Image (cartoon, rainbow, N blue to C red):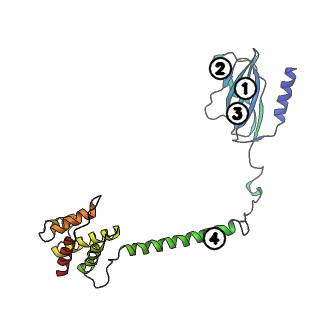
Amino acid sequence: MKTLLLLLFTALLAAAAPVPLGRMQVMKDQFLPGPELQARPGDGREPVVLRITAVYPHGTAGFRYDLSWSALEPGSYDLTKFLEPAAGATPVPLPALTVEAAGVLPVGPPGELPDPGVPELPSIGGYRFWLPAGITLWVLAGGAFFYLTRKQKSAASPSVATAGQSLAQRLEPLLQRALAGPLETGEKAELERLVIAFGRERLGLTDAATPAVWQSLREDAATGAWLRTLEVWLHRRSPVEPAEADLKALIARITAS
């Protein structure tokens, strides 16, 4: 009875439809007599890749196996040809486990392949409508963000130069606002930049680097006192607002220049 069932199962396998190349297939609970088997080591040129995923003892007659296999070339294969006894045991005749693999393309030259045609986007309400609309909205939102950002930056730097203004004329309004209340971060950065430019102009250090200009202003008797106060105000983690007298002294010096 066992032999009849085994032959019937083998016939069903032979009649099964061929499977595509490269697609992993699973065969469960396959009985094979004799000692325990293992996948035969290959050299990378075999047409079939075979793995044993599970082994179950079947009394003293043999073992049951869960197998996974994938064909790399079309044809009919006996999977037992890719097995061998484990631990050097003596091999015994095995019933064939025949599988069939075929290519995934239809028979014939490429010219006979069916034309898939050009896919069409769905009508309004689908990608045909929402894709262009989304791109348009994205561009408009980016333009609006860029415009507003530029506008905010311009508002944060009210001391931008106008035609014909000197450095002293651009620097004095910032210091006047500092007397009325704390400056914004952008205004402080603009103040520092104008102080450096003012120092280059007054001390004749046009080509000097910023550290050299700052050092010269710090060592100058007329500017050293208020510059040290300005450094504390601009650069320390917890800045201290400059004294009103120091700012007035700086304004007076700029006005007199």
Q: Nearer the viewer, residue 197 or 112?
A: 197
Query: How busy is the neighbourhood of tag 4: few (under 14 within 10 Å), some, or many (20 plus)?
Result: few
Q: Position of residue 182 (x, y in %)?
A: 31, 69
Q: CA distance from mark 4 to mark 3?
A: 49 Å
Q: Label 4 belongs to which residue?
A: 133
> Element at badge 2?
helix
In the rendered image of this protein, does residue 232 appear above or below residue 195?
A: above
What residue is rendered at 37% in x and 73% in y? 156
Circle nearer the N terminus (4, 3) = 3
Q: Quadrant of residue 24?
A: top right
Q: CA distance from mark 3 to mark 1?
A: 10 Å
Circle nearer the N terminus (3, 2) = 3
Label 3 close to label 1 by CB (< 8 Å): no
> Element at badge 3?
strand
Q: CA distance from mark 2 to mark 4?
A: 65 Å
In the image: residue 3, left or right of residue 211? right
> Element at badge 4?
helix
Q: Position of residue 71 (x, y in %)?
A: 70, 38
* Numbered disc in front, either 3 or 2: 3
